[in-house]
Amino acid sequence: MRTKVGIIGAGPAGLMLSHLLHLQGIDSIILENRSKEEIEGTIRAGVLEQGTVDLLNSTGIGSRMMREGHIHHGIELQFNGRRHRIDMNELTDGKTIMLYPQHEVIKDLLEARLMAGGKIYFNVKDVQLHNVETNSPTISFIQENGTEVEQIECDFISGCDGFHGPSRQSIPKVERVEKQKIYPFGWLGILTETPPVHPELIYVHHDRGFALLSTRTPKIQRHYLQVDPKDDIANWSDDRIWSELHARVDTSDGWKMIDGPIIQKNIVAMRSFVCETMQYGRLFLAGDSAHIVPPTGAKGLNLAVADIQVLAKGISEFYHAGNEETLERYSSICLQRVWKAQRFSWWMTTMLHRNVEQTPYEYGIQIAELDYVTSSKAAARSLAENYVGLPMEFKGLEFNQQILN
């Protein structure tokens, strides 16, 4: 089979790329090793930057998000038992964030692609990339319940298949420039059947460790506790989790959380990763296949969408104007934003988490940082503008309503 752009992975990056290319009249095929039901049912948090919200709305994907998502104008930082609000809306001239889970974004994108006749092959296996350094790359795979190897001939391949997918591994190891940081923190995440604890996200620094309180729906909430990343979830009974949450988040003015049934819990490790080789020949990496950020800064999905906007611009210019400038600069354009998001995510993580290896001096600096960012308007503005999303650093691409007409 033949297409212009072969896309590996039906996560937010792959689906968004296919959608944006469709709006430009450019065909694509998506390969996904999971089922449609599995990718729609994998529950993931979602804090959407203003730019991500604007893109979804301007390309016809945002109507359900606007009905069911939760717009937040600020966040709360809590330390020494007291809360301090960062008014992001006021500090960024009216920008906000949207709480709308990643799997719901995926559902909306899938519906749009399938209704438009988009080609998506689910449950594929043995995906391999070939001749990516040439102008005629191919992708081989085996369809669900199939035995014969099939092949897609394409002009470009976009690797949107996550950290463990085959795309990045198709770049010779000697050519890949990879950088990584492993944090000594893990997050124990829970879903609980309780009412919302607060209208906005609460980030908590405590001597016992970090905590995050967030809202999922009017009846289901998502909360996190800092734990040892090597800990076993079996060691954390529901009673222990609630006891630890109360110890960390209940405030000195008498505010207390409401307990309730915990319907899901797991522990995830935290790391930062960047593959600076985001392009190799006609292969372009996007999203988690090229970079991972700790969730403290809420940047993962938004970075993937930013990558895709650059890539869609480059591919559109190639086909409609014969211009390869953006494609040639894809890595450098994306990495400017990637490294700024890495810096912000690292800063939020190190400012808020309790590191047992800290000296008393370093701990004093950490508290001073929290005090500064919550008492200085300039420092608060820096946090706010990063949290709501830095502007795209290229010109000439606006996916707006006119494209849909």
Image: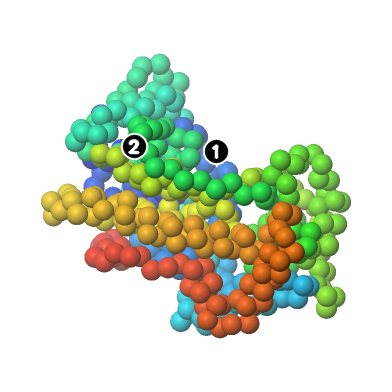
**Amino acid type for the residue under numbered disc 2:** Glu
- In the picture, residue 73 is in which quadrant? bottom right
- For marks 1 and 2, give the CA distance: 34 Å
Judging from the image, what secondary structure is the residue with disc 2 in? Answer: helix
Dividing the image into 4 quarters, which one contains the N terminus?
Answer: top left
Q: Which residue is drawn at 22% across and 38% down?
A: 155
Across and down, in percent, residue 261 comes to 80, 52
Crowding near the residue tagged with mark 2, few <14, some 14–19, many ≥20 C-alpha atoms within 10 Å: few
Which residue lies most toward the top here? 147
Q: Can residue 185 be seen in this view?
A: yes
Mark 1 vs mark 2: which is more N-terminal?
A: 1
Q: Above or below — where is 209 with respect to 367?
A: above
* Disc sitting over residue 175 in the figure: 2
Residue 15 higher or lower than 334, as above or below: above
Q: Quadrant of the C terminus?
A: bottom left
- Residue type highlighted by circle 1: Glu
Which of the two marks, 1 or 2, is nearer to us in this view? 2
Residue 38's label in the rendered image is 1
The residue shown at (36%, 34%) is 174
Where residue 385 appears, as percent x and y from the top left, is: 48, 73
**Is any part of residue 62 visible from this angle?**
no
Residue located 26% across and 66% down the image = 395
Residue 195 pos. (x, y %)? 74, 64
Find residue 29 and report its image quarter: top left
